[in-house]
Image: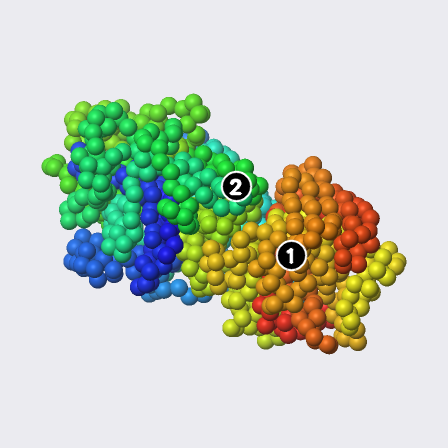
């Protein structure tokens, strides 16, 4: 039985625990303990009940679930059903079913800032979506990027048809003859193309671009005029403008084939401007609202947008086109009550142990610096009974309190009087230091704390791993703020519905039942939601409030001089809130604080002070951003680089790659999958289909492992490596002598006459295992050095080129034996040393084979940004051939993930000794560093690389050879 320590209690950590225990026999395999800072679960999604103020709900911010949160809803549905099955609740209880816990919402508002006669107005823009009969959490297949492209075109056509009589449209171009508009033209043409974008031709792409360029000319031909003051016409024009830029960018940047991550190095607004969106459209409410929705302002500076284009487009498309049931779902209590209390109840009943008041402060590595050996913690409080019961009941519903249940703590009243905040990460936690040890207290660690906490918690990991350091540096967070107002009047009496009616004349709504969720409003609180439906969950004395308003926004960091949030909110309410709530003005024209409800004060100022204000500055309470390019620095749950550590949280690379419940849920599921060895796919973790199930797979598939036919698809070798690739030209005659009978050198033009390309790889391998095995059952970390003769072919064959590996030297006996047995590789047990900038290999009998020294003076970046990637890819992605008896050959495909690898150019010296034993000529080989240019003659320069890799199943040899042959033959025909 393996002991698993889960650090943190947010969505990712809780999801991982739920997935690990979602099997009847889990207790025979795992012993799971979750360690949580403070007294409640939830991270930045935690909420509490204020026992001294009518048990009111107090949140970190505004939390509303999107209808595309499919994994989150699936698990939540199972959790609620298990509550009933275990008789922890009945369907008749408050939130006794998931249908009671979540209510659909198909509308939201954007707030348009419009200058009218030198006066700023805020105009509500009501956006309505149609509900559907689908059930969230039922899975399915997500649209591909090309399918999204067509959905956007359909949407643009429908919007255009609403306003075509309101816009001074230029006549259609001659090429659009027969179509109602060029938008109809491009939709009709796109509908004729194959669904699989890999079957699109260059002509298809050219014709799409030609029509899209015509649309841009057509839109630019709409002359300014009075129509700009028509709310509907103006809004639709901006959507057409932005939609055309999106469609153009999808085609130009080959997103259909490359996926959304391929454009994530560009900031989203800059990407749209690059593809000819107008500045006015990019600055409009429809697009600013997208940033407000994800707090997309690094540093909390709302003039500084910072969201990667790929992440933004993926998120918006999933939100708009893949929701099930409704666009949004509102929780019918606090997030702690609705999400984390049910999870806690079920997990505790299953047998998961919880240690509250345990603040992790350091993950310590062992001597080899490749595994977590110790977890340092502070036990923040001692418990009277030895265990802590975190929930209490409010109106029949189990809830978390807003502060600890002090009587359960030793010296609880003294602690309360001291003002201690057990959740604050502003300063180190206080209490009793303790440590957990590998082999005694844990075997594996799931790190579910937020990335905002990892700076102080993982300093040893950062010192040992460049990728970890870069993740901490490049994946950003932002502070946020929130306020909650309890009002004595309904939202319908604020004057808001009248404003909605004035600027949404075609909309049909009932002012008394209008549910408002609005973003894009004035800072410092740019988002408002009417949460009056939660009043039934609170216990107010008379006179009770009749409405609740939640507000939130990004915030400047704590070190930026700013007034307290309460003071900012007071000025904002007087000057801005009254513009959209005009009937809340008092005689002085400011916000009437007497409309607020308080249990403690009857004065206007006291009522205001008694509302709820919160600023989230530190650690796990900060919001995870998706700044441009950061997706490449995120680590997937199984990519920590440490053999017994998996990751869970919305800060990992998980398919959504943004701060939201669904991202954290996917990450938690992937973390559990890494430990169990499951190969089950997770809905939404990829943009593009993983298999190559096409009509002509030899031409259109890939040689790589995941493209193998079933049942080999989920069975291949995988791992992670840090290593140096060095490319050299060696004399042909010596290399010929190193080839087995039946292999010959192919003709090539990469090296001078009478020489031939050879690749050396000096690396450290981690997490090497069969894809269907959990991480802990893989090989221990080892060093391996390899030489490969590139561009070889089978004598008398069809000319397909391969690489041949004369020798691989590694210091892991089990990996050596496995490579020989399953792949026929010439693996030799050897003594490798990797220290600083040098790498030395000796045979098992101490014969010197080679020494390598590398020299670097450049920063780390993505390999594809360094230049010569096409040439590097051609050398590294060529399949490998090994002899398997007379005339028989085994082919295998190594995928070094060039597209997502990190690298730094290095120069190398390799000293090959006469005792190398494999026929290499003795002497020094020198390679320059990889040059940052699109092309260079001859071989590419050397580079240091960090990447994940896969190696195809040994039984997949025939398919690898067939695909390689067909693809290379096709390439020769093109040339």
Residue 514 position within the rendered picture, expressed as x and y whole percent measured from the top left? 27, 49
Quarter containing the N terminus: bottom left
Image quadrant of residue 273? top right
Q: Which disc number belongs to residue 156? A: none
Q: Secondary structure at mark 2?
A: loop
Quarter containing the C terminus: bottom right
Tag 1 residue: 829
Looking at the picture, does residue 58 appear above or below residue 828? above
The residues tagged by marks 2 and 1 sit, at their Cα atoms, a distance apart of 23 Å
Looking at the picture, does residue 915 appear above or below residue 905? below
Q: Secondary structure at mark 1?
A: strand
Tag 2 residue: 367
Given residues 946 and 931, the one toward you in this image is: 946
Colour setup of the view: rainbow
Instruction: Say which residue appears at 38% left-offset and 50% top-offset.
Output: 4
Residue 620 visible in the shown view: no
Q: Earlier in the sequence, mark 2 or mark 1?
A: 2
**Left or right of residue 590, residue 750 in this image:** right
**Left or right of residue 477, residue 941 in this image:** right
Given residues 928 and 330, the one toward you in this image is: 928
């Amino acid at each position: 039985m393996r002991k698993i320590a889960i650090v943190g209690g947010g969505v990712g950590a809780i999801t991982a625990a739920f997935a690990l225990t979602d099997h009847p026999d889990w207790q025979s395999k795992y012993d799971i303990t979750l360690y949580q800072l403070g007294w409640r679960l939830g991270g930045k999604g935690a909420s509490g009940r204020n026992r001294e103020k009518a048990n009111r709900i107090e949140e970190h911010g505004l939390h509303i679930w999107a209808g595309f949160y499919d994994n989150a809803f699936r698990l939540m549905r199972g959790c609620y059903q298990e509550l009933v099955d275990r008789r922890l609740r009945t369907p008749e209880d408050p939130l006794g079913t998931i249908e009671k816990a979540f209510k659909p919402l198909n509308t939201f508002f954007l707030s348009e800032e419009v200058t009218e006669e030198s006066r700023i107005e805020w105009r509500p823009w009501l956006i309505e979506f149609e509900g559907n009969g689908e059930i969230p959490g039922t899975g399915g297949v997500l649209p591909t990027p090309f399918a999204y492209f067509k959905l956007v075109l359909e949407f643009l056509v429908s919007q255009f048809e609403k306003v075509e009589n309101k816009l001074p449209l230029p006549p259609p171009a001659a090429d659009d003859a027969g179509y109602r508009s060029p938008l109809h033209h491009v939709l009709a043409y796109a509908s004729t193309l194959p669904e699989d974008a890999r079957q699109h031709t260059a002509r298809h792409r050219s014709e799409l671009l030609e029509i899209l360029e015509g649309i841009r000319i057509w839109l630019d031909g709409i002359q300014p005029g009075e129509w700009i003051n028509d709310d509907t016409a103006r809004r639709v024009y901006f959507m057409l403008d932005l939609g055309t830029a999106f469609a153009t960018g999808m085609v130009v940047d080959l997103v259909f084939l490359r996926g959304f991550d391929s454009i994530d190095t560009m900031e989203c607004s800059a990407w749209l401007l690059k593809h000819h969106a107008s500045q006015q459209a990019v600055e409009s409410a429809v697009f600013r609202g997208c940033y407000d929705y994800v707090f997309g302002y690094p540093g909390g500076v709302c003039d500084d947008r910072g969201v990667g284009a790929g992440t933004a487009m993926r998120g918006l498309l999933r939100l708009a086109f893949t929701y099930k049931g409704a666009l949004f779902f509102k929780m019918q209590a606090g997030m702690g009550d609705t999400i984390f209390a049910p999870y806690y109840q079920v997990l505790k009943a299953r047998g998961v142990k919880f240690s509250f008041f345990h603040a992790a402060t350091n993950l310590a590595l062992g001597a080899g610096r490749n595994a977590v050996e110790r977890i340092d913690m502070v036990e923040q409080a001692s418990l009277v009974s030895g265990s802590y019961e975190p929930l209490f009941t409010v109106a029949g519903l189990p809830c978390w309190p807003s502060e600890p249940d002090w009587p359960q703590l030793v010296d609880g009243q003294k602690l309360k009087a001291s003002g201690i905040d057990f959740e604050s990460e502003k300063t180190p936690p206080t209490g009793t230091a303790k440590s957990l040890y590998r082999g005694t207290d844990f075997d594996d660690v799931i790190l579910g704390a937020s990335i905002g906490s990892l700076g102080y918690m993982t300093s040893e990991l950062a010192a040992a791993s460049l990728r970890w350091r870069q993740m901490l540096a490049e994946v950003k967070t932002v502070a946020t703020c929130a306020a909650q107002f309890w009002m004595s009047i309904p939202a319908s009496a604020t004057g808001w519905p009248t404003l909605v009616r004035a600027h949404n004349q075609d909309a049909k709504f009932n002012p008394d039942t209008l549910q408002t969720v609005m973003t894009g409003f004035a800072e410092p609180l740019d988002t408002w939601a009417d949460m009056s439906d939660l009043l039934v969950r609170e216990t107010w004395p008379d006179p009770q409030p009749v409405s609740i308003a939640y507000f939130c926004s990004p915030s400047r960091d704590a070190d930026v001089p700013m007034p307290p949030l309460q003071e900012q909110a007071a000025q904002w309410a007087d000057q801005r809130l009254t513009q959209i709530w005009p009937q809340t003005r008092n005689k002085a024209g400011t916000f009437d604080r007497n409309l607020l409800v308080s249990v403690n004060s009857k004065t206007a100022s006291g009522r205001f002070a008694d509302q709820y204000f919160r600023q989230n500055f530190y650690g796990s309470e900060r919001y995870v951003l998706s700044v441009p390019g950061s997706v490449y620095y995120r680590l997937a749950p199984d990519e920590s680089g440490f053999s017994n550590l998996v990751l869970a949280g919305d800060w990992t690379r998980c398919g959504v790659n943004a701060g939201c419940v669904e991202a954290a849920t996917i990450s938690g599921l992937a973390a559990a999958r890494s430990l169990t060895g499951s190969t089950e796919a997770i809905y939404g973790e990829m943009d593009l289909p993983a298999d190559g199930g096409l009509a002509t797979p030899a031409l259109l598939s890939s040689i790589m492992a995941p493209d193998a036919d079933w049942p080999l698809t989920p069975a291949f070798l995988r791992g992670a490596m840090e290593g140096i690739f060095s490319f050299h030209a060696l004399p042909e005659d010596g290399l010929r002598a190193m080839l087995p009978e039946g292999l010959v050198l192919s003709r090539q033009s990469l090296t001078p006459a009478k020489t031939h390309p050879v690749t050396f790889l000096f690396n450290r391998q981690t997490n090497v295992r069969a894809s269907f095995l959990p991480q802990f059952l893989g090989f221990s970390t080892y060093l391996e050095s390899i030489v490969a003769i590139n561009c070889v072919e089978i004598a008398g064959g069809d000319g397909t080129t391969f690489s041949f590996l004369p020798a691989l030297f590694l210091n892991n006996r089990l990996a050596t034996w496995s490579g020989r047995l399953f792949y026929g590789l010439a693996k030799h047990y050897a003594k490798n040393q990797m220290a600083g900038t040098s790498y030395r290999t000796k045979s098992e009998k101490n014969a010197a084979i080679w020494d390598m020294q590398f020299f670097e003076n450049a920063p780390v970046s993505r390999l594809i940004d360094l230049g010569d990637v096409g040439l590097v890819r051609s050398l590294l992605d060529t399949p490998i051939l090994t002899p398997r008896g007379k005339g028989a050959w085994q082919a295998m495909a190594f995928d070094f993930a060039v597209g997502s690898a990190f690298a730094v150019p290095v120069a190398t010296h390799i000293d090959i000794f006469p005792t190398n034993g494999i026929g290499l000529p003795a002497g020094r080989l020198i390679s320059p560093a990889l040059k940052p240019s699109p092309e260079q003659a001859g071989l590419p320069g050397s580079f240091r690389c960090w990447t994940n890799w896969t190696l195809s199943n040994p039984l997949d040899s025939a398919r690898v050879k067939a695909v390689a042959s067909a693809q290379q033959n096709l390439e020769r025909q093109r040339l």
